[in-house]
Image (tube, helix red, strand yellow):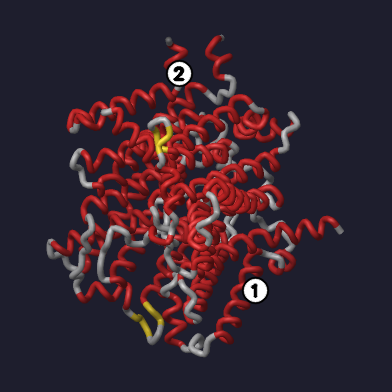
Amino acid sequence: MKAFLKYREIWLAAAIIVLIGLISTRFPAFADPGNLRQVFNDTSILMILALGQMVVILTRSIDLSMASNLCFTGMVVAMLNAAHPAIPIPLLIVIALAVGLVLGAINGLLVWRLNIPSIVVTLGTLTIYRGATFVLSGGAWVNADKMSPEFIGFQRAAFLGIPVLSWIAILVIALFFILMTRTALGRSIYAIGVNPTASVYTGIDVGRTKFIVFCISGMIGGLAGYLWISRYVIASVEVANGYELNIIAACVIGGISIAGGIGSVGGAVLGALFLGIISNALPVINISPFWQMAISGSAIILAVVLNARGERQQGRIILRKVEAAT
Amino acid sequence: MTDIPAPRHIPDRLDKPLRSAIFSWEALLVVVAVAIFVINSFASPYFLDPYSLSDLTFNFTEKGLIAFAMALLIISGEIDLSVAAIIALASTMMGMAVQAGADTPTLVLIGVVVGLVCGAFNGLLVTRLGLPSIVVTIGTMSLFRGIAFIILGDQAYKGYPDSFAFFGQGYVWWVVSFELVLFLIAAVVYWFLLHRTSFGRRVFAIGNNPVAAQFSGVRVGRTKFILFCLTGLMSGIASVLITSRLGSTRPSIAQGYELEVITMVVLGGVSILGGAGSIVGVVLAAFIMGLVTFGLGLLNVPGIVMSIFIGLLLIIVIALPIVWRRLRGSN
């Protein structure tokens, strides 16, 4: 039982259940399974993005360009769809992944080959990618009436009673879970975050691994680009402006240490869910949405305070199960 | 956050003076600035007009003021992402005071004090609880701007007194604006503070090795706390200038400034890993960013496209010395 309570995710899940409980005292229908399914669906994009950011943060890097990547890729697929409605949606998703991959690879190459700190590189590409969206679109918007019904309808279609968007999120969560717990790459990502110097001596190519994590976060940004645009049915330069910090906030609330090496898939998902529930619940319980920023800000600060205490007690643990057993 | 620790260049007097002056970061920035200046003057006939050159300064003075304090903070190995949110909160508080009928000196005092208090709050969280500043200030960024949103909602505060307009719109002499004078004074003060006082040396020492600094008697926590207060203070001052220039307060005021300020600092040659940098570099970088945005503005390039140039400039200027060193090494 004690070992069980060491898991940060358990505490976070408990906090979320308490949050839902508190909200349902004001508005009982909130805890309804149908509504919770809706909340999950609304939070799917943030969860996917948080997972992409997580692998980057685990390696002691940061990707500030994710929201701009999302904006650019979203514009590309929206314009493609407007110009050629015949392109099937799965192909469009592949294109979104490819465009995102290229943008991520640019970040990764600059970090890997030139050894520029990732925060500087992605600060630069943050503005470049968003500016490129303007150049690409000429400042014009792509509206709902220019998008094909399939483009908008794909992620809304229900499969086994759950929207495709939620299924995509579940698939991405599963893939990241396998990546982080069952593959050599996942292990190297943790190792680099815990101790980059030791990782080099154990034969891990730190630079190349960082390149790969930026490619991953780029692809995630691209995927989220399609999902975002087809969900909110408008593509403009303003899409997801400033959202990069929400993504990082979800990671921080989820217990992913900004110093690298600590964090889990479950944490990132729950962190995103926490923010998602707050933004979903505020209008429902008659609190002005203007409170949202202040509440999530306080949640972030509270989360870091708890994180810092946890880190001091536990140190950095990769093999948590082994540690817990001894 | 931090990448693999690499040996850092500690500024000292052992470098060969002439050689280091020619190949220094500041020299590179001067070349870039002159090049952009020349391009601008050819690109638009209106550029060399003294009044348009005076307008140019408004593009960087406010962010530049914050960049000085931010430079010191980043040299010490911390960062503050909440500066733009502090501007919003301070501006909102000034707006509230105006509704209550406050006069100009009170308004300025409120702006500056709110900035200072916000900075102190950041500083306390980082130093007392030992939290990473990048995350703390992401949190306070949402918190401060969130409070502004709670107070203002979708409203705007107007009706600032006429005498208040001087700070953001007034001229001290001919085309020399009050903002520019303040910027230059702050540049000298911060240059002196960083490069000529023991406080500045402590800032470098902390950035290079906080543990060693602690053991050599530097009060690391207190120094960092002062630095956070300084960034807050400068954000408060910038808030007075911006509010005065715009003549109104909206909760979305100064949105995105934090990244521009950091871009300025990094472009100015301050190492994002801490421990190295100079105020001269930051002044030049501020000037370069002003030149780029103003020059492109004269050519009717939209603001969002300018950001491409700023982003490219940042990456290219950072990459140049690395590529240069590598090319020389391979020969």
Query: Residue B82: image x %, image y %?
Result: 39, 51
Labels 2 and 1 in the same subunit: no
Residue ID at (48%, 26%): A312
Q: Is residue B203 visible?
A: no
The answer to whether A114 is drawn above or below residue A132 in the figure is above
**Front label number (2 vs 1):** 2
Query: Residue A52: image x %, image y %?
Result: 53, 40
Q: How many marks?
A: 2
Q: Please, what is the three-letter code of the amino acid marked with disc 1?
A: Val
User: How far apart are the alpha carbons under marks 2 and 1?
Assistant: 56 Å
| Disc ID at residue A237 | none
Residue ID at (33%, 58%): B87
Label 1 chain ID:
B
* Observer-nearest of A162 and B16: A162
* Observer-nearest of A117 and B78: A117
* Residue pointed to by mark 1: B31
The answer to whether A297 is drawn above or below residue A16 in the figure is below
* Observer-nearest of B170 and B325: B325
Q: Please, what is the three-letter code of the amino acid marked with disc 2?
A: Lys
Q: Quadrant of the N terminus of chain A?
A: top left
